[in-house]
Amino acid sequence: MRISFTLNGQPTVTEVAAGTTLMEMLRGLGATSVKDGCSRGDCGSCAVLLDGRAVTACLHFAGQVEGRRVTTVEGLADEDGLHPLQQALLDAGGVQCGFCTPGVLMAATDLLERVPDPTDEEVRVGLAGNLCRCTGYVKIVDGVRDAAVMLAGGNPNGDGQEGSDG
Amino acid sequence: MPLTQIERYHRPPDVDAAWRLLKDGDGAAHLLGGGTDLVVRCPPRVTSLVDLGHIGLRYVEPTDDGGLRLGAMSTFTDLLEHPAVATYGTGVVGEMLTQVGSVLHRNSATIGGHVVRSRLSDVLPVLLALDASVVTYAGQRTERTIAEYLDADLGPHVVVEVRLPAPVDGLAAAFTRFSRTAFDHALVNACCRVDVDDEVVVDARVVVGESTAVGRRVRAAEEALIGATLTPDVVAGVAEVARGSVELHGDWIASAEYRHHLAGVAVARCLTAVIERSQGGAA
């Protein structure tokens, strides 16, 4: 079957078998940031943005994205460098083996679009569908909150702010 | 792995076309809503999918009498982000929706999908307690109460929308659930709703569900509430009635005895929350 959709801002047309999942189609198109962790919607490693909202690509059929916008991590960074979420997660030590990281980034992108200045609890709720077996989550939460500061134009390390010794 | 059993994928332009594809499929066609259940639990005889994503069933609209129409393809996130839905019934709809899966799940799962699946759902007890109705299409549109819908043997049909009636004055409701993990299916869930007039309960719904069955009203507990004033003693008594009269089953996850205990606790917690919300005056 033929599917036309927008992948990371690019109009895309592809042919897949009728029972193909969104995860399989995206990986076949080269978006290998979409990880196959469980294939049943439990781990969140395959999370992508569908029309701006984070969903598990393994639980969607490819046909469901006809005419819609899909964003993967490949569409997050631009020519100027990493997206603030990616940089903040690196800086905070929120990346270890990295397998869950693409899904975490997608869920966090959805969260920060809706809640620009989230509390720890709001970050934990927003990322509750993303399992990480390395970090213990604390540094991921720190990274997402740092990214919120960066996206608001601030410096998460407090440099230049009153009371900071740099 | 792709579902190799799927040979055809249909995108009908309207509800009638979707229903005809389903009916003519004679069991080999399956409706596709959010998809959260179908990829992992696709019945073996299904060879074609009928995608409902292109027929305009994703909406929330008020009705003339103050109720709400929820399009069947509305996701849980759509509903949570709609103030009138999230706050309906002193917030019981939003309270329930935030306890269903993760954000990733709620961004995909649809209200229509949960109604069709019925079992393994936290949605059904709340819809039963709120006297919701379901509009189906099978050649023509038909509205039934959610209880009638669950008991009916309808044959091939499309769930078009869920309707919440206009909230009555004095309505207060609460939902709670128990599960092994946050995202697991509920061992027991419960929704209690009371309509209070001058501090006296004039109508009540006590609905208890479990992981293997659709929620059911506990009539004995409802009768114990009607005419009473909600006090801690009344709550304890009604919870005991519910624990003793609700029909629950045991399995490898939890015994029937344990589920009965949980049912009593769940009803007590819901009614305690109802007291607070009732005193808050919201409806």
Image: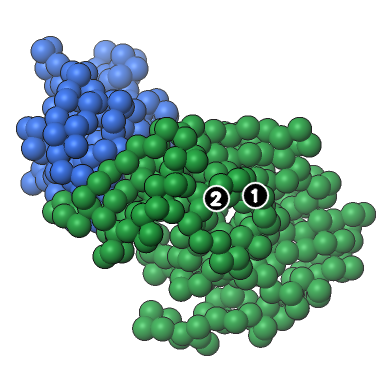
Chain colours: A blue, B green
Q: Which mark is residue B154?
A: none
In the displayed structure, would residue A102 be above or below residue B236? above
Q: Which mark is residue B142?
A: 1
Callout 1 crowding tier (Cα within 10 Å): few <14, some 14–19, many ≥20 = few
Residue drawn at the location 23% of the way across and 23% of the way down: A6
| SS of the residue under disc 1 | strand
Tell me which corner region of the image, top left, top right, bottom left or bottom right, holds residue A161. top left
Q: Which x, y percent locates residue B59?
A: 54, 33
Q: Which x, y percent locates residue B29?
A: 34, 54
Residue drawn at the location 63% of the way across and 32% of the way down: B61
Q: Tag 1: residue type?
A: Thr
Left or right position of B225 against B21: right
| SS of the residue under disc 2 | loop
In the displayed structure, would residue A135 be above or below residue B229? above
Residue drawn at the location 67% of the way across and 70% of the way down: B217
Q: Would you name the residue on which mark 2 appears?
A: B138
Q: Tag 2: residue type?
A: Ala
Tell me which corner region of the image, top left, top right, bottom left or bottom right, holds residue B125. bottom right
Q: Which x, y percent locates residue B241?
A: 72, 81
Q: Which x, y percent locates residue B33?
A: 40, 46
Instruction: Report whether residue A130 is seen.
Output: no
User: In this view, which residue lies farthest toward the front?
Assistant: B24
Q: Which sits in the foreground, B4 or B120?
A: B4
Residue drawn at the location 48% of the way across and 66% of the way down: B119
Q: Chain of mark 2?
A: B
Q: Chain of mark 1?
A: B
Question: Disc 2 vs disc 1: Cβ atoms closer than 8 Å?
Answer: yes
Give the Cα distance between marks 2 and 1: 8 Å
